[in-house]
Image (cartoon, helix red, strand yellow):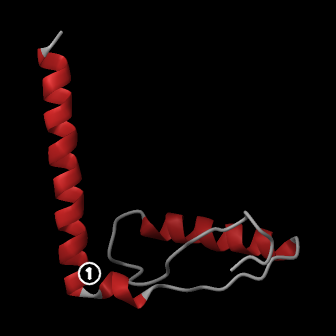
Amino acid sequence: MPTQAGSGSACSTARPGRFPGRSRVLAGGVGRGELLESVGHNVEIAHPASLEDPEFQRHFLVIVATAVAVALTEWSRYSAGR
């Protein structure tokens, strides 16, 4: 992690072939890390293990799906009132 306050950045290297276009995103993240190191930041490649846990993913998807449903309901109410 960067050592200076307010300069956090994140890039995951887990499962590099899983998503299309991921290699460009990964290269950009690595380049950004190298740039931060060049100006004195301490940069680590890290990936929270919980992101690979199926239970975490299941709960996360429930939260996101609920948020989308609420947003669509709000939008429907707003647009119906016009």
The quarter of the rendered structure image containing the C terminus is top left
Write down the residue under mark 1. Answer: 56
Front residue (pair 62, 26): 62
Q: Which type of secondary structure does the marked residue at label 1 adopt?
A: helix
Farthest top residue? Answer: 82
Relative to the observer, which residue lies in front, 73 or 22?
A: 73
Residue that extends furthest to the right in the rendered view of this protein: 39
Q: Quadrant of residue 75?
A: top left
Give coordinates of residue 54: x percent, y percent: 21, 85
Q: Is 52 placed left or right of 31 in the picture?
A: left
In the rendered image of this protein, does residue 72 appear above or below residue 7?
A: above
Establish if 12 lies above or below 53.
Answer: above
Name the spot of residue 23 as percent of width and height, x first: 48, 70
Q: Nearer the viewer, residue 34 or 81?
A: 81
Q: Residue at x 67, y 68 (%)?
A: 8
What residue is shown at x 77% (from left), y 82% (from top)?
Answer: 42
Picture coordinates of residue 79 (x, y %)?
A: 17, 18
Q: Residue at x 36, y 86 (%)?
A: 50
Residue 1 horizontal side relative to residue 78, left or right = right
What residue is drawn where x is 18% and y is 76%?
58
The residue under label 1 is which amino acid type?
A: Phe
Which quarter of the rendering shows the N terminus? bottom right
Q: Is residue 26 above or below residue 67?
A: below
Label 1 neighbour load within 10 Å: few <14, some 14-19, many 20+? few
